[in-house]
Image (spheres, helix red, strand yellow):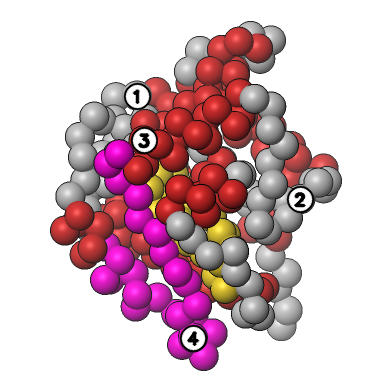
Amino acid sequence: MELREAIRNRRSIRQFLAKSVSEDIIRDLITDTRWCPSWGNTQPWEVVVATGQKLEEFKKKNREALLAGKEAATDIPMPQVWPDDYRARYKELGKSVLGSLSIAREDKKARLQHFVKMFGFFDAPAAILVAVDKDLALEYAMLDAGIFLQTFCLLAHDRGLGTCILAAMVSYPKIVRELFSIPENKLFVMGAALGWPDPDAPVNCFERERGSLDEFVRWVK
Ligand SMILES: Cc1cc2nc3c(=O)[nH]c(=O)nc-3n(C[C@H](O)[C@H](O)[C@H](O)COP(=O)(O)O)c2cc1C
């Protein structure tokens, strides 16, 4: 796939086919992802790949925590207040996702069901989590982790796979640490669902928006 086409056509996938992704493919993806840049070539990412029974346990516990009303306790603090522009875009996205699923805003039950699906990683057959060491220059390591994740998502897209980067995967890092025996000094930055996209699902097809260059580019000459 041509690079520009991959960048323009990659999109978050929120419905997957019931078909597993082989360990060989995931290994290939990570092998290529390693070639992404990082500060001073430090490569500060640590990656957990979850599939099979362990992933199902993770989904179950994550969904249960959501349904029990557990407050998210991310390793990296989440923004509490969004500037107006950002909040508007966030809301628009919510409308698009729920609209594509024919869920009305006031239908609390259906909305909760969607969130439960999200906290079960949209039934993806694989998940990848990226962590960094607590003692690193965190902000820079976070940037490197982001570059890693985007590279992974593009490579997955190139293979016909779909991804959805998911804050919902790292909302309760205690679950991840306990289930996968991860030491306390590893901070989970973000996760992504991985699987074969359901091409016909409306939630994978709605129109997406991006801001115009005028909104965020300052030209200096
Ligand atoms: C850091 C980060 C966290 C995200 N968390 C979620 C999430 O919890 N749930 C979700 O449905 N999408 C999540 N997304 C996907 C974004 O909603 C998506 O990237 C954005 O709407 C742009 O759409 P696109 O990926 O289809 O181009 C996340 C994306 C990023 C980069």
- Tag 1 residue: 201
Q: Nearer the viewer, residue 185 or 132?
A: 185
Which label lies toward us, 2 or 3? 3
217 is higher (above) or lower (below) than 197: below
Can you give x and y, in whole percent of width and height, for residue 173 in the image? Answer: 58, 50
128 lies above or below 220: above
Given this view, does label 1 or label 4 mark the residue nearer the observer? 4
3 or 4: tag closer to the N-terminus: 4
The magenta-colored residue range is 29-53
For the point 20% across and 55% down, the residue is 23
Amino acid marked by disc 4: Thr
Please report contact status of discs 4 and 2: CB closer than 8 Å, yes or no. Answer: no
CA gap, disc 1 and disc 3: 22 Å
Q: Earlier in the sequence, mark 1 or mark 2?
A: 2
* Disc on res. 56: 3
Residue at the image position 40 percent from the left and 44 percent from the top: 193
Whether residue 78 appears in this view of the structure is: yes
Tag 2: amino acid = Pro
User: Label 1: how many residues lie within 10 Å, few (<14), some (14-19) or many (20+)?
Assistant: some
Return the mark for residue 42. Answer: 4
The residue type indicated by label 1 comes to Ala
Q: Which residue is mark 2?
A: 79
Can residue 97 be seen from the camera position used here?
Answer: no
Check contact, mark 1 vs mark 2: CB within 8 A. Answer: no
Q: Nearer the viewer, residue 90 or 20?
A: 20
Badge 3: residue crowd in 10 Å (few <14, some 14–19, many ≥20):
some
Cα separation, mark 4 vs mark 2, equals 27 Å
